[in-house]
C-alpha cells in the first residue's frame, strides 16, 4: 500500500489528469493512454512543492450537498446571465462586493473564491487575508448585503462544515 501511495500521492488528481488527457485527445489510442498514464503519475509529485497542504475532509456528505448546490447554481446563473445580457445593458447593476471571511484556512478560502468564480455572473477578484475579505465582482446586484449573505450561506457555511474550520 505504501508503494502505491508513493507512486500516486494524489490519486484523485492523477485520475483527473488521466481522464482529462483522454477526453482532450483527438483519437485516444494506445499512445495517448500511455502519455495520459505518464502525466497522471508524473505531474502530481513534480508539482507537490506548489500545493499547500489541504485541510482534512471532515464531512464528505456535506461536500456532496455543496457540490449539488454549486452545480444547480451554475445552471441557474447561466440562464440568468443569458437573460440579463440579452436584455438592455442599462438595466445591469454591476458591483464589487466585500465578503467578510469566517474561514481562516487559505486553501478553503481559495476553494470559496473558485466556487464564486465558477458561478456565471460573478468572479473572485482578490482574497485579502490581512483584512479577511473576499472581493467579488458581480454582473448584477440589486441588494449587496443580500448577495454577500447568499455567498456566505450557500458556499462559505457548507465549506466550513466540510473542512471543520
Image: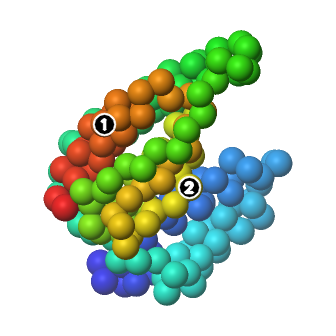
Please name whichever residue, 112 or 26, is drawn nearer the observer in this view of the structure: 112
> Residue pushed farthest right?
26
Q: Is residue 160 left or right of residue 140?
A: left
Q: Which corner quadrant holds the C terminus?
A: bottom left
Q: Position of residue 28 (x, y in %)?
A: 75, 51
- In the picture, the disc for residue 82 is none
Could you classify mark 1 by the number of other residues whose Cα lies within 10 Å: few (under 14), some (14-19), or many (20 or more)?
A: some
In this view, 147 is above or below 8: above
- In the picture, the disc for residue 125 is 2
Query: Residue at left 36%, top 67%?
Result: 131
**Which circle's residue, 2 or 1, is located before the other in the chain?**
2
User: Where, by quadrant of the figure, is residue 67 drawn?
Assistant: top left
- In the picture, the disc for residue 149 is 1
In this view, 32 is above or below 152: below
User: Where, by quadrant of the figure, is residue 121 drawn?
Assistant: top right
Please name whichever residue, 82 or 27, is drawn nearer the observer in this view of the structure: 82
Query: Residue at left 60%, top 60%?
Result: 18
Q: Position of residue 51 (x, y in %)?
A: 46, 77
Q: Position of residue 137 (x, y in %)?
A: 56, 44
Query: Residue at left 53%, top 51%?
Result: 124
Secondary structure under tag 2 reads strand
Q: Which corner quadrant holds the N terminus?
A: bottom left
Could you classify mark 2 by the number of other residues whose Cα lies within 10 Å: few (under 14), some (14-19), or many (20 or more)?
A: some
| Mark 2 and mark 1: Cα distance apart in space | 18 Å
Secondary structure under tag 1 reads helix
Amino acid at each position: 500500500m505504501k508503494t502505491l501511495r508513493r507512486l500516486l500521492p494524489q490519486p484523485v488528481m492523477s485520475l483527473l489528469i488521466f481522464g482529462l488527457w483522454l477526453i482532450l485527445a483527438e483519437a485516444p489510442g494506445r499512445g495517448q493512454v500511455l502519455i495520459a498514464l505518464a502525466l497522471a503519475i508524473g505531474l502530481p509529485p513534480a508539482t507537490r512543492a506548489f500545493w499547500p497542504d489541504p485541510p482534512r475532509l471532515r464531512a464528505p456528505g456535506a461536500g456532496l450537498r455543496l457540490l449539488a448546490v454549486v452545480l444547480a447554481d451554475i445552471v441557474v446563473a447561466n440562464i440568468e446571465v443569458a437573460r440579463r445580457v440579452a436584455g438592455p445593458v442599462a438595466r445591469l447593476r454591476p458591483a464589487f462586493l466585500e465578503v467578510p471571511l469566517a474561514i481562516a484556512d487559505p486553501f478553503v478560502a481559495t476553494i470559496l473564491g473558485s466556487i464564486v468564480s465558477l458561478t456565471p455572473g460573478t468572479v473572485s477578484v482578490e482574497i485579502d487575508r490581512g483584512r479577511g475579505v473576499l472581493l467579488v465582482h458581480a454582473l448584477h446586484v440589486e441588494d449587496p448585503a443580500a448577495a454577500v449573505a447568499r455567498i456566505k450561506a450557500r458556499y462559505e457555511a457548507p465549506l466550513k462544515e466540510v473542512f471543520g474550520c
